């Protein structure tokens, strides 16, 4: 990887990167520490204060004064805290709660179902631990998420639980927020550092490089989703690490075994977190196999095989099947539809949410409208994050006029994988055309973020040449930052454009 030690602007750029990363990381950490189901907070406070007012009036009528009154009041407060159901929680949707339910089932002895370590039957019986993202087979409920990521999370949770005695049930804010920091924020900080190196490697102007780093920190949905456990953030980080290792091999001629192992491990992790990323894994595998077959076979393939084996093994242990739960949703074979079920919770019988979905989960009937909204509509890649216009322009610039053949090859990799995944999502059946459900953006494409940021560099460098083009680029970045910041409390909300369309009565 080239350095900037002889570049007079290099030190300034690195300082700017450090400032951007520091400010962005601090802002994201602040949001994580404030994570709360804020829609319930006011209700909970109101109920507590209303009941407390009744108790205060009762104590006053009893004629208690001084220390006796204070002690009695504290006892009543404690009783209310224990009696009133707790509505607040640091888990913001059924999506992230689904993974945390699996984590608790794996670690907490009193919640484990004998013979079914991944079953969440007992977890969902606890107050505030409901989720719609679950499946049922063999008479037991399970998270609908692939079990590899929750298994990795459970390893850290086991250490926390055994060292402190705290659980996600007894101390949800302390334990939950700590795990969000370790699994989201710390890896994202590493992501920014590696991305800055790629920006230095492929950028040609000071302004273009700093613009791309500004977009990375403030203009994408990765910072939005840093407050919740999800698969999209680790997929994006894994894609960036795999790309970084591949650049060291492809562009810098570094044949050290470790870079092949890193590329294989993280390319496979990208696919493990986002199934359509198999296209990225496949193309990268073929490219490195063609470039350095022996090193790829001895370093890349074994590392990728570890991830593949872990993915299949955890799925087999959890479900007795090699396919992840979301592939068991057959409309023709009821026995292979794990989303069609009923279950009991606290003595009440409920039907699977997916038998009668509501709102956006009903699916978009028109494939034409679906394509429009995915690209330029209420969940649009270009309407919500218009800075990606520069990324696609950059792919074209490298593809048709790249000064280095390897840049054209990189553009082909990013462009082909992008088109393949877009085609996959655009051709889904109606019940899958739900834009990712209740979410602030097209989350299925978030893992492309590092690839598109790198591809943005030639366009950003071109925009740096004139004042008016720089102004246009800044407007695009500002608009993207608006979309990323709009769901300030909870990323599991509709995008601002969809809310605005609903306000105007357009949907």
Image: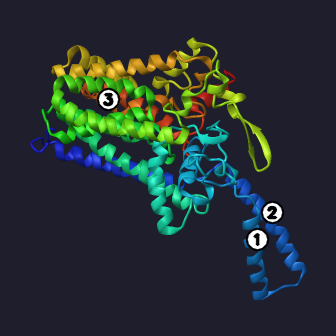
Task: Please tell me which residue is depicted at 21% across the width and 46% down the height of the picture.
Answer: 12
For mark 1, what is the residue?
A: 79
Q: Nearer the viewer, mark 3 or mark 1?
A: 1
Task: Please tell me which residue is depicted at 64% across the width and 51% down the height of the picture.
Answer: 123
Q: Which of marks 2 and 1 is in front?
A: 1
How many marks the image carries: the answer is 3
Q: N-terminal of the two: label 3 or label 2? A: 2
Q: N-terminal of the two: label 2 or label 1? A: 2
In the picture as drawn, the residue positioned furthest to the left comes out as 6
Task: Please tell me which residue is depicted at 78% across the width and 74% down the height of the picture.
Answer: 76
For mark 3, what is the residue?
A: 470
Would residue 248 be found to the left or right of residue 235 on screen?
left
Q: Please tell me how crowded label 1 is: few (under 14), some (14-19), or many (20+) other residues with Cα within 10 Å.
A: few
Q: N-terminal of the two: label 3 or label 1? A: 1
Q: Please tell me how crowded label 2 is: few (under 14), some (14-19), or many (20+) other residues with Cα within 10 Å.
A: few
> Looking at the rendering, in which quadrant would you find the C terminus?
top right
Name the secondary structure under disc 3: helix
Would residue 26 be found to the left or right of residue 192 on screen?
right
Is residue 83 in sight in this rendering? yes
Is 311 situated above or below 403? below
Task: Please tell me which residue is depicted at 44% across the width and 54% down the height of the picture.
Answer: 155
For mark 2, what is the residue?
A: 50
Residue 390 or residue 326, whichever sits in front: 326
Distance between the alpha carbons at the discs numbered 3 and 2 = 56 Å
Residue 363 drawn at (x, y percent): 63, 22
Name the secondary structure under disc 2: helix
Is 453 situated above or below 75? above
């Amino acid at each position: 990887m080239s350095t900037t030690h002889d570049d007079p602007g290099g030190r300034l750029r690195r300082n700017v990167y450090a400032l951007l990363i520091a400010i962005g990381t601090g802002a994201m950490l602040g949001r994580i520490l404030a994570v709360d189901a804020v829609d319930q907070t006011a209700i909970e406070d109101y109920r507590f204060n209303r009941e407390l007012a009744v108790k205060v009036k009762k104590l006053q009528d009893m004629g208690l004064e001084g220390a006796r009154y204070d002690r009695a009041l504290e006892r009543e407060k404690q009783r209310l805290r224990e009696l009133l159901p707790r509505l607040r929680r640091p888990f913001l949707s059924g999506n992230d709660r689904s993974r945390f339910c699996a984590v608790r089932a794996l670690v907490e002895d009193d919640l484990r179902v004998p013979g079914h370590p991944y079953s969440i039957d007992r977890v969902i019986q606890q107050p505030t631990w409901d989720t719609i993202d679950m499946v049922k087979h063999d008479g037991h409920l399970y998270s609908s998420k692939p079990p590899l990521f929750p298994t990795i999370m459970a390893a850290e949770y086991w250490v926390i639980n055994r060292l402190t005695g705290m659980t996600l049930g007894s101390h949800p804010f302390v334990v939950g927020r700590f795990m969000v920091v370790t699994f989201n924020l710390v890896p994202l900080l590493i992501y920014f550092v590696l991305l800055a190196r790629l920006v230095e490697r492929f950028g040609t102007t000071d302004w273009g490089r700093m613009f791309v780093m500004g977009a990375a920190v403030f203009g994408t949905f990765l910072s939005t989703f840093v407050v919740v456990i999800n698969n999209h953030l680790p997929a994006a980080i894994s894609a960036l690490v795999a790309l970084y290792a591949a650049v060291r091999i492809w562009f810098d001629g570094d044949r050290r075994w470790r870079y092949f192992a890193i590329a294989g491990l993280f390319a496979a992790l990208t696919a493990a977190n986002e199934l359509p990323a198999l296209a990225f894994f496949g193309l990268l595998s073929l490219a490195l196999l063609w470039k350095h077959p022996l090193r790829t076979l001895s370093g890349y393939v074994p590392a990728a095989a570890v991830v593949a084996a872990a993915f299949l093994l955890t799925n087999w242990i959890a479900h007795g099947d090699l396919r992840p739960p979301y592939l068991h949703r057959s409309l023709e074979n009821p026995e292979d539809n794990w989303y069609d079920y009923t279950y009991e919770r606290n003595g009440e019988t409920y039907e699977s949410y997916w038998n009668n979905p509501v709102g956006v989960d009903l699916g978009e009937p028109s494939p034409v409208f679906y394509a429009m909204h995915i690209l330029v509509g209420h969940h649009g890649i270009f309407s919500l994050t218009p800075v990606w216009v520069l990324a696609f322009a950059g792919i074209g610039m490298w593809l048709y006029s790249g000064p280095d053949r390897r840049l054209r090859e990189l553009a082909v990799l990013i462009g082909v994988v992008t088109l393949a995944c877009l085609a996959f999502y655009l051709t889904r059946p109606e019940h899958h055309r739900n834009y990712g459900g209740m979410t602030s953006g097209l989350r299925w494409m978030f893992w492309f973020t590092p690839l598109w940021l790198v591809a943005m560099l030639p366009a950003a460098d071109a925009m740096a040449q004139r004042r008016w083009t720089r102004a246009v680029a800044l407007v695009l970045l500002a608009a993207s930052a608006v979309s990323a910041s709009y769901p300030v409390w909870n990323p599991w909300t509709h995008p601002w454009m969809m809310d605005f369309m609903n306000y105007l009565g357009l949907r």
